[in-house]
Image (cartoon, rainbow, N blue to C red):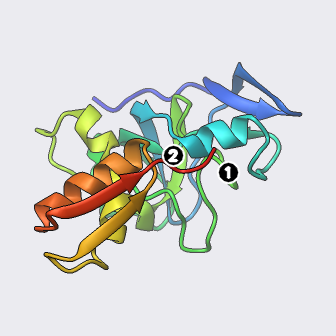
Amino acid sequence: MPTAVRPQMRAAQRKAGVVGLRRVATPRPGPGQVLVAVTVAGICRTDVAVAQGQLPARDPVVLGHEFSGHVVELGPGVDDVPLETQVAVFPLTPNGEFLGVDLDGAFAEYVVVPRTSVWVVPATLPPRVVAYAEPVAAAMSLTNEVAPNERVFLRGHGRIAALVARLLALRGCAHVVTSPSEA
């Protein structure tokens, strides 16, 4: 049975410099878009920077871009994703806008995203694992530039740095030196 979409939802929104849990209108998908019911959302430094006003963002904006969910509504022109399908979402849209910065993000019950940003994943994958697709992909984009057995200096000590170090080790880079970044 399809998920019933309510007209209003809860969302962690930054508005006029203040982050709060607010009731906002549930977004509706337009042409080429899908409505995703958020299952699991993770927080990263980008979200913190937007929340603290250190990264320019739309105002108001719903935070969040690392998440898993399932498709609950299709916009006009989208017919290739079955409803209730579990998905991972690439947060950078084809026109260069970023979820949780330029567009409302995933710290909400629902989020609208372009169909081209949605990746269907097996229902057998735990939603928490699917939510890690974006940070793992970001880390992998860095490791693809490194050949096995190269020496690597990795600056940083956060979650992405740890992911990069693990992925470099899987690529065969036995010589990875890490250093914390400056605050």
Q: Which residue is mark 2?
A: 65
Q: Are marks 2 and 1 in contact (CB under 8 Å)?
A: yes
**In terms of sequence position, does the residue under pointer 2 or pointer 1 come before the other?**
2
| Residue 93 spot, x, y in % from top left | 54, 66
Give the position of the C terminus as an image quadrant. Answer: top right
| Residue found 12% across the figure and 60% down from its top | 170
Question: From mark 2 to mark 1, how far is it between C-alphas?
Answer: 9 Å
Please tell me whether residue 81 is drawn above or below residue 158 in the rendered image: below
Name the mark on residue 93: none
Viewer-nearest residue: 108 or 18: 18
In the rendered image, the residue lying farthest to the right is 16
Viewer-nearest residue: 24 or 141: 141
Tell me how many marks there are.
2
Viewer-nearest residue: 33 or 16: 16
Viewer-nearest residue: 19 or 109: 19
Left or right side of 142 for 181: right
Left or right side of 101 for 144: left
Q: Which residue is mark 1?
A: 101
| Residue 23 spot, x, y in % from top left | 70, 21
Type of the residue with mark 1: Val
